[in-house]
Image: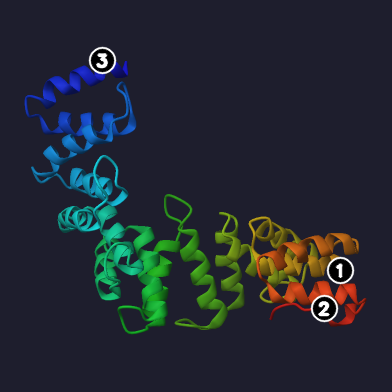
Amino acid sequence: DDKEAVKFQRLYAEKGVVNAQFRLAQMYYEGLGVEQDYKEAVKWFRLVAEQGDAEAQRSLGEMYYEGLGVEQDYKEAVKWYRLAGYKGDVNTQCILGTIYDEGEGVAQDYTEAVKWYRLAAEQGDTDAQCLLGHMYDQGRGVQQNFKEAVKWYRLAAEPVVFEGDASAQYNLGVMYDKGQGVAQDHEEALKWYRLAAEQGDADAQYNLGWMYDEGQGVAQDYKEALKWYRLAAEQGHGTAQNNLGLMYARGDGVPQDYKEAVKWWRLAAEHGYSEAQVNLALMHDDNLDCLNSPN
């Protein structure tokens, strides 16, 4: 019974038991056994955070960052996040990396972002590993180094207990596709795209569709291309929507259907995809030999 649990936790929290104070804060935060009350949550998180508990420091940082129970204050949020981060809290380290990477409430600082991503990545956090790989890939906060990018992408991408990080799998696929930091290998690219695509990554679904469409790294298979284009298109991927329209217009892997082609081109055009806008105009002018698809 949550209400009884609140009474129990409060009894020990008021006696100074740290675990009870933290649990009581969580109950106020989540509204478990008590009316949700962010101010009361902040009060108890603060008591625990001031005793040096990293998880409470992260939680208090979140309250300040989101303006829950306190006036929004990015500086105060970062103060508490940094305290937790230096204590080794891996989630906070990744959060700090993102804050500095994107300049959310602080001056954008790629070097500082890399520092925090690395701390979390070295503890095995897959999000941080992927993000650190991206920093090396783009040369942000570090000298561009494709081999180092591949190293971190691979650590995040490899399925161990779980499926592996889909973004890292997609990015690793791109590295193999382009031959950046590794020998170019379209079959290996296909493998990583497929792993990411099966987890719902729209960019990977599009790239996998394109490889089946063009027969790159795999035997050409329009039906398989259509399947992956459609999955990406249904997530709003403009290029996939355009190419799905082309499949219907040409009758590749599907009965020719101009109405269906126009439907997908219109969706792509609404996303600002210029090739789809051109294709709609060509369709209107009955000039189908010049239909546009990306490389």
Image check: 12 left or right of 123? left
- Compare marks 1 and 2 and give the one earlier in the sequence: 1
- Secondary structure at badge 1 equals helix
Residue 141 tag number: none
Residue 291 tag number: 2
Q: Amino acid at mark 1?
A: Ala
- Compare marks 1 and 3 and give the one earlier in the sequence: 3
Q: Which residue is mark 1?
A: 249
At label 2, counting other C-alpha atoms closer than 10 Å, the crowd grade (few under 14, some 14-19, many 20 or more) is some
Which image quadrant: the N terminus? top left
Q: Which residue is mark 3?
A: 4
Circles 1, 2 touching at the beta carbon (< 8 Å)? yes
- Secondary structure at badge 3 equals helix
- Residue at 22% in and 31% down: 23
- Residue at 56% in and 54% down: 199
Residue nearest the viewer, comparing 293 with 72: 72
